[in-house]
Every structure is written in structure tokens, then in C-alpha cells.
């Protein structure tokens, strides 16, 4: 049986962007015997998720040029509310945690760079040598526990906790950009979790209000992926821009 239709069905079953015919043909021909279907699917998925959706015009395009795009008026602030009439694949160009001040966002990005995104609990054991030390040790322990709870709360907010709200810039295959905001918390979205170039599927019925896509777990499917060059440029530029504008927010 021809591998091309099998591979196409397997790709679409995972909600990935529809691949171009030339891409599928290149994957399934030229090798005898051809790789097994699971291997081809893994290769196709990795290539699709690392591709630029807007690069769908040439003969070597990975994504099908007929992949649906966002409506022309999706970014119009004059449209009170509308719903997407079809599934649309988009890629992430920017992400911001609206629950944190600019300076807190600077600290968050710097912690990610140092590999210190979250910190585990520290257990401190102390022994009172005299009865008179007991009260001081008790107070010290209480302060440590209070600081630990505060640190845990801050870590939860910075890592995309239940109360965080994120705003993203999304782009469709035609290059149209639109803001998107979490209407309901989506666990996979967060600084350090969501990468630039990551693919998302906005499902039929996704609400767009005043030019902003409202994201919910029911209508937004995170597909993963990353465009490395974009992500590095974003990370460096984002940190510089935040530092520049964070003066008013920086704690004294």
C-alpha cells in the first residue's frame, strides 16, 4: 500500500498541520525498503513542528499551502465577538506573563537561564544547646517557614501557576499576527514552557473578541515544537527590553 496516504492520515490524526505533497513524497521515496510508518511519522512530526508556517509557497515547502488561515478581520477591535469557523494552525511569536511585574519577569527569565526555574524546599535542622535558646530558635524556624511559603508562592506564579494569565502573539500561515490571552488557565502555557515557533491548533468555535483570541483548554491544543533561531533572538531581546522598561517596577 502507498505510504503517502497512510502517513498523511497518521499526521492529521495527531492534529498536526497538513503536510505538503512534495514533503511526503520526499520522505517516503528514495530508500529501499522504506522506513516503517512509525519512524516516518516521528520524522514528519519533528520537521513540521520545527518549520515556519509562513514558508508554504515554494516547491520545498513542508506545510501544505492550503492550510486554513485566520479570518481577515481577526485582529479588528471593532468586532465585539466572533468564532472561528474552522480549525486554524498558528505559531507562537511572543509570550508574556501578565501576572508578574516587569522586574519579576526579568528575574524569571534570568532564573531560567541559570537553570534555577524552581527551587525545592530546604530543610534546616537546628539543635538548642540551652533552654534559653528555644524561643529564639522557634522564632527563627517560624521565619524560615514563612519565607519558604512566600518563595513557593512566587515560584508558582512565575512558573505559570493556576492564577497566572499569559498573553501571546500568534501568527498564521499567511503571516497575520494576532494577540491571544488565556480566558482559562492552560497548563502547557508559560515562560520556559512555551517556545517561540511552537505550534498550536485553534479549534472551530474559538472565540475572538475585540481583536484578541481567547484561549481555553477546550479550544486550544498545544502541539509543541520550536524554531531555535527565533527562540534565541526572542530570549535575548525580551530580557533586554524588560530590563530597559523595568526601572519603575524594580524594588528598592
Image (cartoon, rainbow, N blue to C red):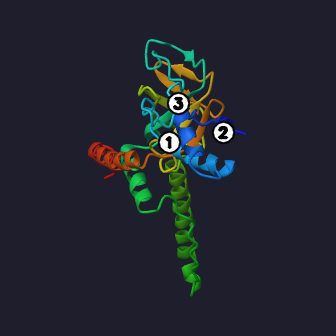
Give the residue number, with chain letter if any, for mark 3.
64
Q: Is residue 161 visible?
A: no
Q: Badges 3 and 2: C-beta atoms under 8 Å apart?
A: no
In terms of sequence position, does the residue under pointer 3 or pointer 1 come before the other?
A: 3
In this rendered view, identify the residue nearer to me: 242 or 153. Answer: 242
The answer for how far apart the CA atoms under marks 1 and 2 are is 15 Å
Q: Badges 3 and 1: C-beta atoms under 8 Å apart?
A: no
Q: Which numbered dot is residue 18?
A: none
Quadrant where the N terminus sits is top right
Give the residue number, with chain letter if any, for mark 1.
198
Q: Is residue 245 above or below residue 201?
A: below
In this rendered view, identify the residue nearer to me: 29 or 159. Answer: 29
The secondary structure type at the circle numbered 3 is: loop
Q: Is the residue marked by circle 3 packed among few (<14), some (14-19), or many (20+) residues within 10 Å?
A: some
Could you tell me which residue is drawn at 57 percent across and 87 percent down? 129
The answer for how far apart the CA atoms under marks 3 and 1 are is 18 Å
Give the residue number, with chain letter if any, for mark 2.
14
| In front: label 1 or label 2 | 2
Q: Position of residue 99 (x, y in %)?
A: 47, 41
**Quadrant in the picture for residue 216:** top right
Q: Position of residue 97 (x, y in %)?
A: 46, 41
Q: Is residue 217 above or below residue 111?
A: above
In terms of sequence position, does the residue under pointer 1 or pointer 2 come before the other?
A: 2
Q: Is residue 8 left or right of residue 56?
A: right
| In front: label 3 or label 1 | 3
In this rendered view, identify the residue nearer to me: 124 or 31. Answer: 31
Q: Is residue 27 left or right of residue 10?
A: left
The answer for how far apart the CA atoms under marks 3 and 2 are is 16 Å
**Quadrant in the picture for residue 78:** top left
Q: Residue furthest right?
A: 1
The secondary structure type at the circle numbered 1 is: loop
The secondary structure type at the circle numbered 2 is: loop
Amino acid at each position: 500500500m502507498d505510504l503517502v496516504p497512510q502517513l498523511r492520515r497518521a499526521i492529521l490524526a495527531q492534529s498536526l498541520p497538513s503536510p505538503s505533497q512534495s514533503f511526503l513524497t520526499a520522505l517516503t521515496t528514495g530508500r529501499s525498503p522504506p522506513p516503517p510508518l512509525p519512524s516516518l511519522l516521528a520524522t514528519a512530526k519533528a520537521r513540521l513542528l520545527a518549520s515556519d508556517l509562513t514558508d508554504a509557497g515554494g516547491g520545498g515547502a513542508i506545510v501544505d499551502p492550503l492550510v486554513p488561515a485566520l479570518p481577515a478581520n481577526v485582529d479588528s477591535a471593532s468586532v465585539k465577538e466572533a468564532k472561528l469557523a474552522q480549525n486554524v494552525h498558528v505559531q507562537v511569536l511572543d509570550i508574556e506573563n501578565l501576572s508578574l511585574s516587569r522586574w519579576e519577569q526579568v528575574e524569571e527569565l534570568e532564573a531560567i537561564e541559570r537553570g534555577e526555574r524552581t527551587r525545592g524546599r530546604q530543610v534546616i535542622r537546628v539543635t538548642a544547646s540551652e533552654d534559653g535558646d528555644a524561643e529564639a530558635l522557634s522564632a527563627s524556624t517560624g521565619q524560615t517557614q514563612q519565607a519558604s511559603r512566600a518563595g513557593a508562592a512566587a515560584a508558582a506564579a512565575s512558573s505559570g501557576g493556576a492564577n497566572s494569565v499569559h498573553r501571546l502573539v500568534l501568527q498564521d500561515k499567511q503571516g497575520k499576527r494576532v494577540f491571544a490571552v488565556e480566558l482559562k488557565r492552560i497548563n502547557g502555557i508559560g515562560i520556559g514552557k512555551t517556545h517561540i515557533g511552537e505550534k498550536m491548533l485553534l479549534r472551530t468555535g474559538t472565540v475572538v473578541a475585540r481583536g484578541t483570541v481567547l484561549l481555553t483548554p477546550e479550544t486550544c491544543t498545544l502541539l509543541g515544537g520550536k524554531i531555535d533561531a527565533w527562540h534565541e533572538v526572542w530570549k535575548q531581546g525580551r530580557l533586554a527590553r524588560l530590563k530597559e522598561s523595568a526601572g519603575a517596577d524594580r524594588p528598592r
